[in-house]
Image (spheres, rainbow, N blue to C red):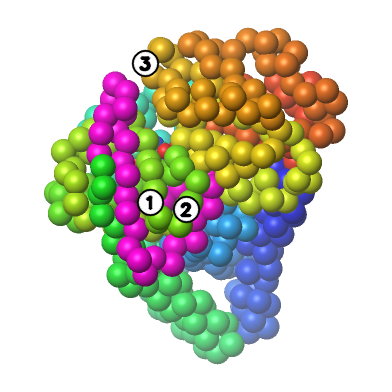
Amino acid sequence: MLKRHRYSFGLFWLIAIFLLPLSFIQTLSNGLPIIYQSEFRAIYYGTIAYVWMLFAIYLSTKPKWLDRLIGLPEMYMVHGMLSIAAIVLAYLHKEGTVSSGWIKTTGDWSFDLFLGLMIYSLIFMAGWLTNRVPILKQIKHILEKVFKHELSIWIHRLNILAVILAFIHVQLISYIVAIKPFIYLFDGASLIVLVCYLVSKFVQPLTYQQGIILLNRTIAKNVQELKIKLPRSSHMNLLAGDYVFLAFPDYPGLREMHPFSIANAPNKERVITLAIRGDGDFTRELGQVTTDSRVQIDGGYGRYQAFLDDQPQTSNIVILAGGIGVTPLLSTIDANIDRNLKIFYTAHKQDDLLYLERFDHWQQRPNIDCQLQVGRFKDVQVLTQLPKDWQKNTVFLIGGPSSMMHHWIKVLKQNGAGNGQIYFEEFSW
Ligand SMILES: Cc1cc2nc3c(=O)[nH]c(=O)nc-3n(C[C@H](O)[C@H](O)[C@H](O)COP(=O)(O)OP(=O)(O)OC[C@H]3O[C@@H](n4cnc5c(N)ncnc54)[C@H](O)[C@@H]3O)c2cc1C
């Protein structure tokens, strides 16, 4: 991914791992009674674990400013990895300290809950992991029939309870509470994260835009196209390639926010188009949504356009799209219509190729070449048709199933592409 993005991402990791826990460790180390010297290291582990957990909760509130900087998928990955690392440290903390009574009980409950939820979340909530480990993906696929995504979200929220237990655990330790600078910092940080979490759950929904469904039609087998009119007062910051979260307050079963990419370039008419494949409970129910229904929208999120804006404007753009993953790329093409574009779009069946008329229209332009095909493109088919000197003057946008994205990233890199030339956003995190 692009240099600035990699820099922001690296800086973000650095802050999360080192900088955030530093002040906690410093204030703590200044006040720890020497009689606990043998436990110092384990106490620091517990402190770092708590700070990382707080940060992971903050990330789960989807802070918009961070999304535009590093992207939600990356944020969720950091959220998952920090939580895992925190549990490892919590284990070392548990093993290296001696406690009894409620201090021990609350600490143990917190740890056991974290551990159980981590195992559950690694299967059901960590798309960044399941997409890379086939066995986990299979387990998820089988169990998801019972443990639906909405249920998983609720189970995942029990992490808050585990953090509250850890908070109480600390408040019960008298020699820690006696270290005033530390405990003020500890309580303050916990309060800030709690407020951010509550705001994201109860206040943020009040700021969601209320759109109206203009059109809901089937455009291919199992794919609905929704056209949504945003209100006149809409202040949504939408860019091409973005995704929005939406829910239908008047339809039971469609009230949980789900992410979908916009298939048209943002316009003055304030109409957004979405193409949605029926993959589960929410998406399969969309056919019943009638014209004029109310829809809640939160967005935009995503970095496709930000990626392009950070590249030289003379670069060629190569689009590799597969199946429903084409949606964010459709709006990106529309918004960058004057650039040199080479498009490879594939689907399993002829009927699954969406918006053929738009590709016909684009194909009329001298700067755009569209290749549409049923079934996968062979590596050589794509590589031989790339622009001359593509390693130097071309950027790649990929959208599609996870396996397809990772295949093309591997092939392109093996043939000389740099990280900064490729951008993709997966449809799961
Ligand atoms: C950034 C992004 C953009 C997307 N754009 C599109 C699009 O343009 N068109 C389209 O058809 N699909 C898109 N999706 C996928 C779409 O969000 C899921 O198919 C949908 O949420 C599935 O919900 P469900 O209840 O119907 O299915 P479920 O059976 O609940 O879930 C099917 C799979 O979708 C994932 N999923 C479910 N709910 C969510 C959620 N709230 N957030 C993230 N993942 C979830 C789960 O990993 C699950 O394995 C996008 C996903 C992401 C993350």
Q: Measure how far apart labels 1 and 2 are at the Cα level.
A: 7 Å
Circle 3: residue type:
Asp
User: Residue 276, percent across and down?
Assistant: 34, 35
The residue that appears at 75% across and 13% down in the rendered structure is 384
Q: Residue 267 carries which label?
A: 2
Q: Is residue 257 visible?
A: no
Other-residue count near label 3 (Cα within 10 Å), few / some / many at <14 / 14–19 / ≥20 = few
Q: What element carries label 1?
A: strand
The residue that appears at 62% across and 58% down in the rendered structure is 69
| Left or right of 344 on screen, residue 340 | right
Q: Is residue 214 above or below residue 296?
A: above
The residue that appears at 59% across and 17% down in the rendered structure is 371
Q: Residue 351 carries which label?
A: 3
Q: Which of marks 3 and 2 is in front?
A: 2
Q: Quadrant of residue 405?
A: top right
Q: In this view, does 104 lie above or below 287?
A: below
User: Residue 299, percent across and down?
Assistant: 43, 57
User: Which residues are drawn in magenta?
Assistant: 216-245
Circle 1: residue type:
Val
**Magenta-span inclusion, residue 231:** yes
Q: Measure how far apart labels 3 and 2 are at the Cα level.
A: 28 Å
The one of 291 and 377 positioned closer to us in this rendering: 291
Q: Quadrant of residue 218?
A: top left
Q: Do the residues labelled 1 and 2 touch (CB within 8 Å)?
A: yes
